[in-house]
Image (spheres, rainbow, N blue to C red):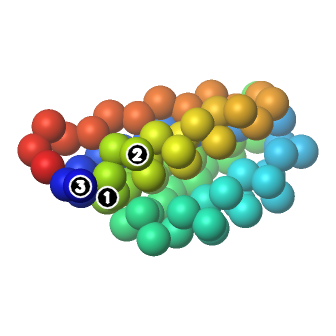
């Protein structure tokens, strides 16, 4: 399968899921090229952006697991070129 380059945006409204979120990101670490996390303390929200490279199946599996965590929203955009 072709690898695709993309970005994944994660909004964390429930900080209690941080250990589970980090475990998922660690298990898919081979996909992550870069990661930036910004806590928004005034609203008790964190925003994480990832630059990823992998197959659509692998990226979809990661985003699916992240999106199943309570209080976590995930969106991804992938380059059309493989």
Q: Is residue 48 left or right of residue 41?
A: left
Asked if the residue under mark 3 is in contact with the one under mark 2, i.e. CB atoms within 8 Å, the reply is yes
Query: Which residue corresponds to the image point at 67% horizontal and 57% vertical from the top-left?
Result: 24
Judged from the image, the secondary structure of the residue bearing numbered disc 2 is helix
Q: Residue tagged by mark 3?
A: 1
Q: Which mark is residue 35?
A: none
Single out the mark in the foreground, 2 or 1. Answer: 2
Residue 74 x, y percent position in the rendering: 55, 32
Q: Residue tagged by mark 1?
A: 53
The first of marks 3 and 1 along the sequence is: 3
Mark 2 crowdedness (10 Å alpha carbons): few <14, some 14-19, many ≥20: few
- The alpha-carbon separation of the residues under discs 2 and 1 comes to 11 Å
Q: Which mark is residue 57?
A: 2
Q: Is residue 30 above or below residue 14?
A: below
- The alpha-carbon separation of the residues under discs 3 and 1 comes to 12 Å
Q: Is residue 54 above or below residue 61?
A: below
Judged from the image, the secondary structure of the residue bearing numbered disc 1 is strand
């Amino acid at each position: 399968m072709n690898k695709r380059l993309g970005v994944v945006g994660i909004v964390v409204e429930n900080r209690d899921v941080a250990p589970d979120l980090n475990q998922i990101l660690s298990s898919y670490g081979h996909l992550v090229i870069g990661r930036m996390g910004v806590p928004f303390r005034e609203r008790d929200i964190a925003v994480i952006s990832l630059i990823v490279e992998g197959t659509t199946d692998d990226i979809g599996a990661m985003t699916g697991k992240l999106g199943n965590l309570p209080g976590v929203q995930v969106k991804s955009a992938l380059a059309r070129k493989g």
